[in-house]
């Protein structure tokens, strides 16, 4: 039986050994780079749907758009790192930004859906992945 041995270059082995100690620093930076791409797409989609195509004059205050943001990278109970795009609560009038976003996304009786989250997720996937790859490579070069 034939046998092949492939040895990694010494430089790569050193980077991998240093990566282990730096993982907790690098992973949040990489996730936030990708999350920022999605956040910008969600914001632009939200701006495009708020107050557009309504029968009555828009009552938008801009508070929903200002409340959207990106969470810090955190570990979940399964040990996975996550960042989330979401809305700060509560609104100045005591209402819920998440409720308004849900109504815009899915509609309600007499108000058609104006999706902005789902299209942002699907259209920014490739750019998000590329931003994370670029950030990871940047961090690895610094090791």
Image: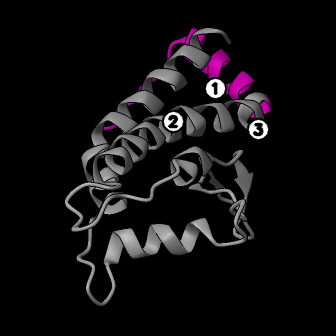
Give whichever of 113, 120 is nearer the camera.
Answer: 113
The x and y percentages for residue 104 are 37, 69
Q: Is residue 127 above or below residue 63?
A: above
* Mark 1 neighbour density, 10 Å: few (under 14) some (14–19) many (20 or more): some
Task: Count up the numbered dots.
Answer: 3
Q: Is residue 81 above or below residue 104?
A: above
Circle 1 — which element?
helix
Q: Which residue is mark 3?
A: 24
C-alpha gap between disc 3 and disc 2: 19 Å
The image's mark for residue 36 is: 2
Residue 9 belongs to magenta span:
yes
Q: Earlier in the sequence, mark 3 or mark 2?
A: 3
Where does the magenta region start and end? Answer: 1-21
Query: Magenta stretch containing residue 96, yes or no?
Result: no
Q: Position of residue 20 (x, y in %)?
A: 73, 33
Secondary structure at badge 2 equals helix
> Horizontal and vertical percent for residue 25?
75, 31
Using the numbered discs, state the Cα–Cα distance from disc 1 to disc 3 in whole angstroms. Answer: 14 Å
Picture layout, residue 30 above or below residue 103: above
For the residue pair 83 and 30, the one nearer the viewer reads as 83
**Residue matched to label 1:** 16
Res 103 quadrant in image: bottom left
Q: Residues within 10 Å of mark 2 (few under 14, many from 20)?
A: some
């Amino acid at each position: 039986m034939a046998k092949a041995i492939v040895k990694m270059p010494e430089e790569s082995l050193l980077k991998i050994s240093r990566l282990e100690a730096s993982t907790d620093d690098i992973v949040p930076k990489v996730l936030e780079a990708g999350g920022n791409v999605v956040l910008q797409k969600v914001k632009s989609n939200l701006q495009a749907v708020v107050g557009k195509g309504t029968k009555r004059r828009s009552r938008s205050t801009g508070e929903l758009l200002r409340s959207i943001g990106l969470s810090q990278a955190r570990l979940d109970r399964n040990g996975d790192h996550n960042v989330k795009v979401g809305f700060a609560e509560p609104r100045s009038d005591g209402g819920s930004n998440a409720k308004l976003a849900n109504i815009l996304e899915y509609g309600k009786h007499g108000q058609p859906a104006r999706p902005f989250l789902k299209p942002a997720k699907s259209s920014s996937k490739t750019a998000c992945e590329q931003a994370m790859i670029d950030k990871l490579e940047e961090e690895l070069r610094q090791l």
